[in-house]
Amino acid sequence: MMKMAVIKNRYEFVFLFDVENGNPNGDPDAGGMPRLDSETSHGLVSDVCIKRKIRNYIEVTKEEEVGFKIYVKEKAVLNRQHELAYKEYDLKPETNKLPKDEKESVMITNWMCNNFFDIRTFGAVMTNAVNAGQVRGPVQMNFSKSIDPVLPGELTITRMAVTKEEDLEKERTMGKKFIVPYGLYRCEGYISAYFAEKTSFSEEDLELLWEAMINMFEHDHSAGRGKMVARKLYVFKHDSKLGNAPSHKLFDLIKINRIVSSNEPIRSFNDYDIVANRDDLPSNVEMTEKIDGL
């Protein structure tokens, strides 16, 4: 894999996406219903859910290219992934241990970073029986939260077919489906240039990350998830590795105001006004809107 320039700047981002008549992130602890803040009823989407969709987009569009394999994917056996690195250097893994030679140990971990996009982006704990080390990824994000409380609905669905022979005389079988009628979700994230140096996260990787976030829902449609759309992506670029302003103050520059009466339910992205306050942006931080025309 040809070495690309590692990012040299700190970034933060605010990502807005919405769901209509779908379940953006089922909660296995609640029978698969949409995740909720139990005290406020605001909808939640886990960071793991968003990272999964980014991984899926990369797998669809780039995995055949050298350096863009996906480490955490369906039916992946992680120890087999680690063995690829040992085979590359003709080394034999020792159970639960990295090579004793520090140079060889670094080579194994670096090979994993260089060949798997999600490792050099999000990091990975690879200290399994076939040990490939551990890295902290430069890209991290919080749980996404809906701007307003959401009220999930539980719908009964029917199926004309049956699964078992003994159910053949039944007229139909019944099931359940959860939906959020509408919710606009806000995700906030961070990108560290210092951790990027550890994993070789490059400028090309960064652009691919933005591309994935903008387009990932277009390759993730299902009846259960309803209509999910990437609405806005605001990126804050500092002019240094260390950064020039606290992340929370930059996040506060993006305001989301409801423009319909508090008595009316939110049912559309157009029920909100999105304001990006550039007047209070620090002079050494650049703000870019990555999704235009919405």
Image (cartoon, helix red, strand yellow):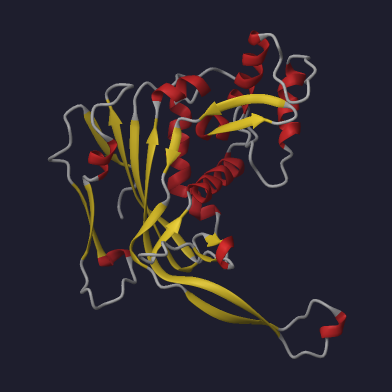
The image shows residue 108, relative to residue 65, as above or below, that is above
Q: Nearer the viewer, residue 161 or 121?
A: 121
Q: Nearer the viewer, residue 177 or 60?
A: 177
Q: Residue at x 49, y 71 (%)?
A: 179
Q: Considering the image in quadrants, where does the C terminus appear?
A: bottom left
Q: Residue furthest right?
A: 165
Position of 220 with respect to 232 (left or right) is right
Position of 84 with respect to 19 (left or right) is right
Relative image position of residue 209 (x, y in whole percent): 46, 38
Position of 75 with respect to 184 (left or right) is right
Position of 78 with respect to 293 (left or right) is right
Q: Residue furthest front?
A: 39
Relative image position of residue 75 (x, y in whole percent): 73, 46
Q: Quadrant of residue 250?
A: top left
Q: Residue at x 12, y 40 (%)?
A: 279
Q: Considering the image in quadrants, where does the N terminus appear?
A: top right
Q: Residue at x 45, y 41 (%)?
A: 211
Q: Quadrant of residue 244?
A: top left
Relative image position of residue 255 (x, y in whole percent): 22, 52
The image shows residue 142, relative to residue 229, as above or below, that is above
How many dots with numbers? Answer: 0
Relative image position of residue 170 (x, y in whole percent): 77, 89
Q: Residue at x 47, y 64 (%)?
A: 227
